[in-house]
Amino acid sequence: MDTATPAPVPSFSYDDELGGLPQGKPALTIGIVLLDQFTLAAFAGLVDVLRLAGDHGGRSRQIHTAWRVMSWDGKPRCSSAGLTIDVADGLPDDPTQFDYVAVCGGNDYFNGRLPEPLRDWLRLAAAQRVRLLGICTGTFALAQADVIGPRTVCVHWNVLDTFRERFPQARAVVDRLFVDEGDLISCAGSTAAIDLALYLVARHCGRDKAQQAMRHMMLQGVRPGRVPQAHFHTDLSGIQDLRVRQAAHFIEQRIDNPPPLDAIARYVGVGRRQLERAFRVATGMSPMAFQRQLRLEYGSWLLLNNPSSITQIALDCGFADGAHFSRDFRAHFGQSPRQYQQAAGRDVGVSVFPA
């Protein structure tokens, strides 16, 4: 069992240059609430940035930053990777002791039940103007607690459809790593939690502390929130037929290795002719035409968001070579891949991601 029991949030920090004398509270304090099956990478990335920015030399003292790992009932939580993390305690009566409350979710997002104590506590935190962080699918819990309202939230591309179905009043996007709405910040999870944490450290503790953590983590740069998530996502919200939606998701997940029609039909559990008829009714095209269009749209996304060569992009989209990709791309978009890049002001081989 992997355990992590951090010390309670301190009420002071230390200044090494002054011989370790108390110098007031940390500049950034975050209460972290773990949900069942939370994503380990997102949680660990968030905590490690705080740890490395909070002290010199990676000594892990909570000086410039402080954090407390909690659960709604004070019991350990098991991550989606099967590792169990001990927590410091349950939810405190006063959430204002934190600058932010981070809710870390994971694979339990489909569970529609939110414990009442957690729901009430999140509402209390919001009412007392404690800023909230939705980490990975922790944003689902914030939506269930009804503390999001009309704000825009960022979710991972893999859960976008589910989030929109359950919370249609919230505007969910996947074209960012994280979205800052002032009193609510949400991120896609996984490594995006690192970028969010560095963003908060730079804001509250200074860029030097963020750079300190970044160097320790051997990162080459900080990705701003506006950087798109590193995956193409097509909008399937207009497809009502469940069979067609399942088939479309299957095609999207195997976009680099296009499955044959028979494999798609077997995945959905229908005959190929039945699937073809359903696809034409729902989308106006055959499954294979839909697959080809999706691959080309993915290619257009990669051309603007990926530093790879056109040949590599062609292979990533499931084409046999660059010539085949370029021919189909021109037929669909009316211009070559290179012309498409140039029209968008991007040159081949230049990444849109910051160094």
Image (cartoon, rainbow, N blue to C red):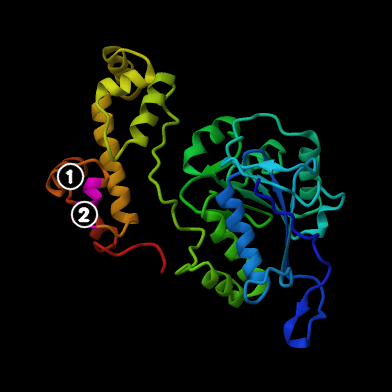
- The rendered magenta stretch, by its main secondary structure, is classed as helix
Residue underneath mark 2 = 310
For this view, does 135 lie left or right of residue 352? right
Which secondary structure, mark 1?
A: helix
| Percent position of residue 58, x then y | 63, 71
Residue 180 can be seen in this image: no
Pick the quarter of the image with the C terminus.
Answer: bottom left
Residue positioned 58% across, 59% down in the render: 196
Report the residue at 58% width, 57% height from top: 45
Q: Which one is nearer the viewer's eye here, 191 or 78?
A: 78
Front residue (pair 18, 25): 18
- Residue under the image location 58 percent in, 40 percent down: 80
Percent position of residue 162, x then y:
53, 32
Q: Position of residue 245 (x, y in %)?
A: 41, 25
Q: Where is the N terminus found, in terms of image quarters?
A: top right
Q: Residue at x 56, y 54 (%)?
A: 179
Residue 271 seen anywhere in this rendered image of the structure: yes
Q: Amino acid at mark 1?
A: Phe
Q: Residue furthest bottom?
A: 18
Question: Marks 2 and 1, Cα distance to the nearest angstrom?
Answer: 9 Å
Residue 166 position by quadrant: top right
Do the CB atoms of the residues marked 2 and 1 lie less than 8 Å apart?
yes
On the image, numbered disc 1 is attached to which residue? 325
Q: Quadrant of residue 304?
A: bottom left
Inspect the magenta stretch and tell me whether residue 310 lies in it.
Answer: yes
Mark 1 crowd level (few <14, some 14–19, many ≥20, 10 Å Cα): many
Q: Is residue 267 above or below residue 147?
A: above
Q: Amino acid at mark 2?
A: Ile
